[in-house]
Amino acid sequence: MNTDTLSTLNTEDAGRGGSREVRNRGRQEEALLRTENLAVGYGKQNVVEGIALRAEPGKILCLIGPNGAGKSTLLRTLIRELPPTAGAVWLEGRNLNGYGDRELATMRAAVLTGRPEPEMMRCEEVVEAGRYPYTGRLGILSREDRARVRECMEQVGILSLADRDFQCISDGQRQRVLLARALCQEPKLLVLDEPTSFLDIRHKLDFLQLLRDLIREKQIAAVMSMHELELAQRFADTLICIRDGRIDRAGPPEEVLTGGYIERLYGMDRGTYDCLTGTAEAGRLTGAPKVFVIGGGGSGIPVYRKLRRQGIPFAAGVLQENDLDLPAARALGSLVITDRAFERISPEKAEEALRVLERCESVICTVSFGDQNRENRRLMERGKELGILRTADGMEEA
């Protein structure tokens, strides 16, 4: 499938108000799941409305947005755990309400939030539960069913856990067991609600890469919610941003996550999120800078963060506009002096930086000098002349 058939993706400009219709660039029949003017909520109370989204085989559609925005409510509606308050959900061209329970269980599977605690069950028995839509009324697994269970456990790397008590394994292992159970249903649609919430960073990456590979291999359409923006940005094909009871933006991560948008989406009044690098920062300190940091190439970032933690306002410079340090410096520093990218630092910018430096109590240099930033050497030498040059490790003296 080419890039012209990416799931979901244009919305009206956020400032126009009204419902947000998400349009697909490909043909309608390419969507496994789609919604029409869907509203979700509880009773007569809508949480999110005007929802039009599409999910395609082999791709991940990821919901992001603040707590309480309605992400979980929407996911539970997509699997028919909650009825829509308006509109409809279509799965393979059929209204979701047209499926019987057993047939629907062979079409979609879910891994929802919470820590399931099946008592006295081995991991293999938990995975076997995914085969019950295919068994008779007595729930007896055939030889083929058991072979499928073992195959799914092997695919997610948990075959060695088959005889372990589900309550006695790690959170990362539990998520893989639950994923294997979902795969045992042989679903065309997989819905996951915050699947990495209980995992450490290693297991988050392991789980998401495994999920990504399985979805592509089996051509499953996946819809999930996440709070880890940097991971959603890297693993999702499409982001759906929910705010104030509607879809606020939708599209590929590189189109949705533009400068300053995350702060608006989450109503952030403290700190910043850099969409380009996928990093959050604590926020700028105000006041006259006490420390001047000569950094560059990423070397100054740990210093900026340490000064921010210590509550010490600082200035940074001279940084070129394409420098790796610049996003963090702008997010955290009280003053940043910049110059044009790919060119030598100008004497004018160096003089501006020198005037700031001479008003500071300390100077920290984290960078080596080349031809383009040789003016920064003058700044370091001036700090040494004034007796205020410190090492990064000795910044506490400032």
Image: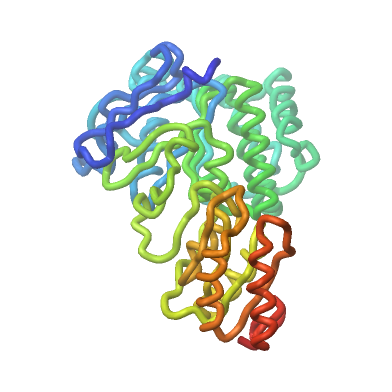
Question: In front: 382, or 34?
Answer: 382
Residue at the (48%, 37%) spot, across then down: 253
Which quadrant does the N terminus fall into? top right
Give left or right: position of 156 versus 319: right
Quarter-of-image position of residue 386: bottom right
Image position of 73 with respect to 361: above or below: above
Question: In front: 385, or 208?
Answer: 385
Image position of 224 with respect to 303: above or below: above
Residue at the extreme right of the image, as rendered? 160
Image spot of residue 90 (x, y percent): 36, 20
Give left or right: position of 182 versus 377: left
Image position of 52 with respect to 1: above or below: below
Give left or right: position of 321 versus 68: right
Count of numbered circles on the image: 0
Image spot of residue 374 (x, y percent): 68, 63
Residue at the (53%, 50%) spot, across then down: 228
Whether residue 275 is visible here, answered yes or no, is yes
Question: In front: 309, or 93?
Answer: 309
Which quadrant does the C terminus fall into? bottom right
Residue at the (46%, 67%) spot, across then down: 283
Whether residue 115 is visible here, answered yes or no, is no
Give left or right: position of 71 versus 323: left
Residue at the (60%, 74%) spot, across then down: 306
Image position of 91 with respect to 302: above or below: above
Image spot of residue 95 (x, y percent): 34, 18
Question: In front: 141, or 243?
Answer: 243
Image spot of residue 286 (x, y percent): 42, 75
